Amino acid sequence: MICCCNNVRKSEIVAAIAGGARSMATIFDATFAGCGPCGGTCQPEIAAILKQQLAAPSAASRGK
Ligand code: FES
């Protein structure tokens, strides 16, 4: 679980990136991760996943 506010798992973020999301905003549009009552404490984790996925998409899609 990456975003507890919106119940978004890493696999959903990976899927959003695989589906074309390339920024925090587009990941939010696809999954609602990163903008909840906590104020976005999960954003660094989402950014790290995004960076990892864009660097090595095939390897990262295995990590759930
Ligand atoms: S945990 Fe993601 S916005 Fe709060």
Image (spheres, rainbow, N blue to C red):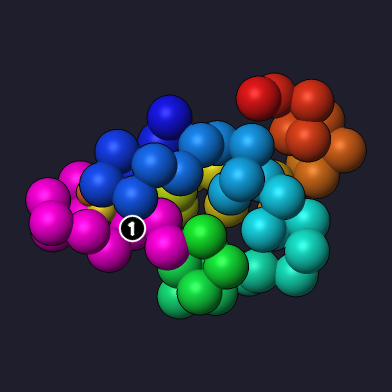
Percent x, y of residue 10: 55, 36
Confirm whether residue 10 shows in the render: yes
Q: Nearer the viewer, residue 50 or 18?
A: 18
Tag count in the figure? 1
Secondary structure mostly seen in magenta is loop
* Quarter location, residue 36: bottom left
Residue plotted at (75% across, 69% down): 20
Helix, strand, or loop for circle 1? loop
User: Where are the magenta residues, as a range?
Assistant: 32-44
Which corner quadrant holds the C terminus?
Answer: top right
Q: Name the residue at 45% across, 52% down.
A: 47
Q: Which residue is mark 1?
A: 34
> From the viewer's perspective, is 20 left or right of 51?
right
Q: Residue furthest front?
A: 7
Can see residue 24?
A: no
Q: Indicate whether 54 appears above or below 45.
A: below
Residue furthest left as drawn: 38
Rendering coords of residue 22 (x, y %): 63, 69
Q: Residue at x 78, y 35 (%)?
A: 61
x and y, in percent, of residue 13 in the image: 58, 49
Quadrant of the image occupied by residue 33? bottom left
> Is 45 in front, or is 15?
15
Quadrant in the picture for the N terminus: top left
Task: Relative to 57, say whether 27 is above or below.
Answer: below
Answer with left or right where residue 5 lies relative to residue 39.
right
* Residue 62 drawn in magenta: no
Q: Amino acid at mark 1?
A: Gly
**Left or right: where does residue 24 sit relative to residue 58?**
left
Dot 1, crowdedness within 10 Å: few (<14), some or many (≥20)?
Answer: many
User: Disc 1 beta carbon < 8 A from ligand 1?
Assistant: yes
